[in-house]
Image (cartoon, grey):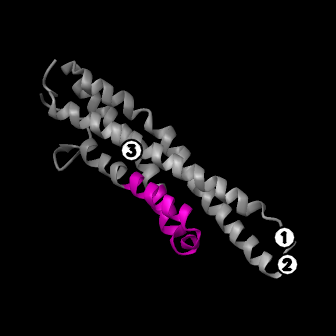
Amino acid sequence: MALADDLVTIFGLPAHPLLVHAVVVLLPLSAAGAAALAVVPRWRQRYAWPLLGITLLGVGSVPVAQWSGDQLYARLAALGNPLIRRHAELGNDLLPFALGFGVVVVAMLVAGRLADRERTAAADDTAVPRTWRRISVVVAVLVIAAGAATTVQTVRIGHSGSTAVWDGVGTS
């Protein structure tokens, strides 16, 4: 089957299989990094910016992978492979997971920074409330849960795509 001219390619290959690697690598990597910062708060000062960068790149790569996947799906839909359809359906569900994860990572970094300030102020004055320290603990739990959910969804989507390729792209 010849690919249409409007399909975006990289070195002659459909862009989607190449672009999804940004999602597959960056989202789980940022989930692991966020979990580490959630568990070891003193690492926030040193690794907050790299974590934020990796998270934003991972979340930002999701719509690009979806766009290229939609293009490829439009070309492969004629094959009638239900595995490709299932992969496309799962792929369309990742963006809300990724966005939610990105939001809680930002919330963790902001709450953590405010909790650090609160902790510093408490060293001088014991009457300082622990509001941000409590909030940062709650947000840390949310980050771990959202990171795990995003990673699981990413793996499910990737597995369905691999299955579609290896178990019969050309079958109907």
The residue that appears at 31% across and 46% down in the rendered structure is 20
Magenta region, residue range: 26-55
| Residue 73 horizontal/vertical position (percent) | 28, 29
Residue 100 position by quadrant: top right
Q: Which element is circle 1 on?
A: loop
Work out how far the residue at label 1 is from the one at label 3, CA to CA, in angstroms. Answer: 46 Å
- Is there a contact, CB below 8 Å, between mark 2 and mark 1? yes
Q: Quadrant of the N terminus?
A: top left
Q: Nearer the viewer, mark 3 or mark 2?
A: 2
**Is 124 part of what is drawn in magenta?**
no
Residue 170's place in the image compared with 102, above or below, is above
Q: Which element is circle 3 on?
A: helix
Q: Main secondary structure of the magenta part?
A: helix
- Pick the residue in front: 28 or 125: 125
- Pick the residue in front: 82 or 120: 120
The residue that appears at 41% across and 52% down in the rendered structure is 27
Name the amino acid, label 1. Val
